[in-house]
Image (cartoon, helix red, strand yellow):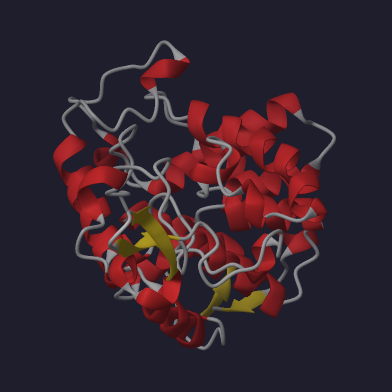
Amino acid sequence: MSVINLGPDPYLAHQPNLTPKSERKDFRNFEAGSVAEHVYNTYKLMHTNQNVDFVKRKHLEWSGCSHAEMSMMDAVMSLDQLVDESDPDVDFPNSFHAFQTAEGIRNEHPDKEWFQLVGLIHDVGKVMALWGEPQWAVVGDTFPVGCAFQNSIVFRDSTFQDNPDDTNPSYKRLTILLKLTYFSCIVFVSSKYGIYKPNCGLDNVLLSWGHDEYLYRVLQFNKCSIPEEGLNMIRYHSFYPWHSEGDYMYLCNDEDLRMLSWVNEFNKFDIYTKVAELPDVKKLRPYYQLLIDKYCPGILKW
């Protein structure tokens, strides 16, 4: 698949309804604002359809990297065609956000080129949405499937009632709820472990399918030389119930806990660089092309 890049269209970046955010508490507000309805609808579809069987199918469909061949910069620039329907903070193309994140990291970590590159490419897996995947299978916060859906998941109370995993006995456990003299009541209750073992490690946990896992697989498939810390930033940056809410720690092993600080360091740039002032992509592109040539060179398989 060939890609012609003209760069982000500045007209797409016009955002008359986007209120500037002055405080950190203004970011990731899922309850208010002009984008709240379409954000909720995206999560409703995600939480209805993302289950164990669906995630396993997507791993088989996408992990072989047989859908396209293109350079990493072409993939980044293709995101000028995508506005993330799950993001309550921006309504401009994702390509601008890529350079915003990278520049935020570059300013604070000028000595870590690989970290800057992670900022640039972290959302590139969203190209799946340009190739036919619905956005609810590409964007948004991720969460484990095959075990209890915890309250830390966005819109937990109102979006999972039609998810088949929520009533699947294979992901639940029997418990005695009430025992009286003449009878006992046995009910199913959600198991926080489900199909997993305690401290099994996140590498053994199926997260809802999305751009995080896909890009992680692409980088591994193409033997890109980004350090393990960077790969974990990419793989788990949307797993907010874990890195931001402190949930699902009972599934983590020591390596996951070691990587947690790196993921959190990345996420402050992912979130708080989303501002209305847009970067000069034309000016920045040559610098980041050098980083791509170092860590993810040539034409990659996607």
Look at the picture and state if 48 lies above or below 98: below
| The C terminus sits in image quarter | bottom right
Residue 208 location in percent, x, y? Answer: 44, 64
Q: Residue furthest front?
A: 181
Looking at the rendering, which quadrant does residue 79 occupy? bottom left
**Nearer the observer, 9 or 105:** 105
Q: Is residue 144 visible?
A: yes
Looking at the rendering, which quadrant does residue 51 occupy? bottom left
Which residue is rendered at x = 43% and y = 58% of the image?
148
Residue 244 location in percent, x, y? Answer: 55, 35
Which residue is rendered at x = 38% and y = 51% of the image?
140
**Nearer the observer, 154 or 108:** 154
Residue 276 location in percent, x, y? Answer: 37, 24
Q: Is residue 251 left or right of residue 48?
A: right
Which residue is rendered at x = 72% and y = 65% of the image?
296
**Nearer the observer, 172 or 142:** 172
Look at the picture and state if 110 lies above or below 134: above
Look at the picture and state if 143 lies above or below 93: below
Q: Is residue 209 visible?
A: no
